[in-house]
Amino acid sequence: MTQPSDAAGHPSVEPEERGLVDRARAGDREAFGALVDRHHGAVLGFLMTVARDADLAEECAQEAFLKAFRSLASFEGRSSFRTWVSRIALNEVRGQWRWRKVRGLLSLGSGEDAEVDSDALRSDAGTADELSALERRLELERAMAGLGRREREIVALRLEGYALHEIAETLGVTEGTIKSTLFDATRKMREKLQ
């Protein structure tokens, strides 16, 4: 069975999600909670990959869902709820980066670059599976370290399972740009891993 699509041929918002959005707009907090439950993992995973700072990612994810709740009336449904809230989350993390940069300049400091603290992460790992997953994550971080901001955002969204058209909608660029940037970023990552 094929999923219904919009005029551009992209999958349309599924009826169950549309119903949750409509109920949330009417003030049903449980419906909005169901939307958060559905999409929090993908949004947080994307932000953690982009921000490279778990606390910042969690803070921006929470703020994004709060802003989404407050702005539900402006959600037109032309994209999925996940795409819409991901765009809000990306704007949040970019705003935090700008603020940190300004704050760093004001304090005459060197700014705050989020780095992965591999020793701290390893101390949290318990089982062999967790350690293996952590090592894969650190390897991915090393491969992504040389990517530019836009490349990193695109790769992070793709790793979280976003379709090319969803990435394009989230970042406000064409699918062609996404494809070529993804191709270049993948090549750079392969070179870094070799």
Image (cartoon, rainbow, N blue to C red):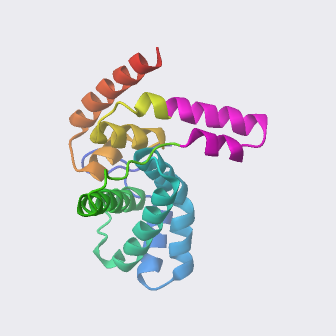
Q: Nearer the viewer, residue 177 or 44?
A: 44
For image coordinates 42% across by 41% down, the residue present is 156
Chain part drawn in magenta: 117-140
Horizontal side of residue 61 vs 74, given as left or right: right
- Is residue 78 among the parts visible in the rendering? no
Left or right, 86 with respect to 138, comes to left
Q: Residue at x 55, y 43 (%)?
A: 117
Seen as rendered, the residue at the extreme front is 108
Q: Kindly tell me whether residue 140 is visible in this rendering.
A: yes
Q: Position of residue 85 (x, y in %)?
A: 38, 62
Q: Is residue 24 left or right of residue 119?
A: left
Q: Residue furthest right?
A: 127
In the displayed structure, 154 sits above or below 112; it is above
Q: Position of residue 86 (x, y in %)?
A: 38, 57
Q: Which residue occupies 51% across, 67% down?
A: 35
Image quadrant assignment for residue 133:
top right
Q: Image quarter for residue 173?
A: top left
Q: 183 or 55: which is nearer to us?
A: 55
Which SS does the magenta portion mostly show? Answer: helix
Q: Position of residue 165 (x, y in %)?
A: 31, 43
Which corner quadrant of the image does residue 74 belong to? bottom left
Count of all numbered marks drawn on residues in the image: 0
Give x and y (percent) for residue 13.
Answer: 40, 58
Q: Residue at x 47, y 68 (%)?
A: 62
Name of the residue lying farthest toward the top: 194
Magenta stretch containing residue 128, yes or no? yes
Residue 137 shown in magenta: yes
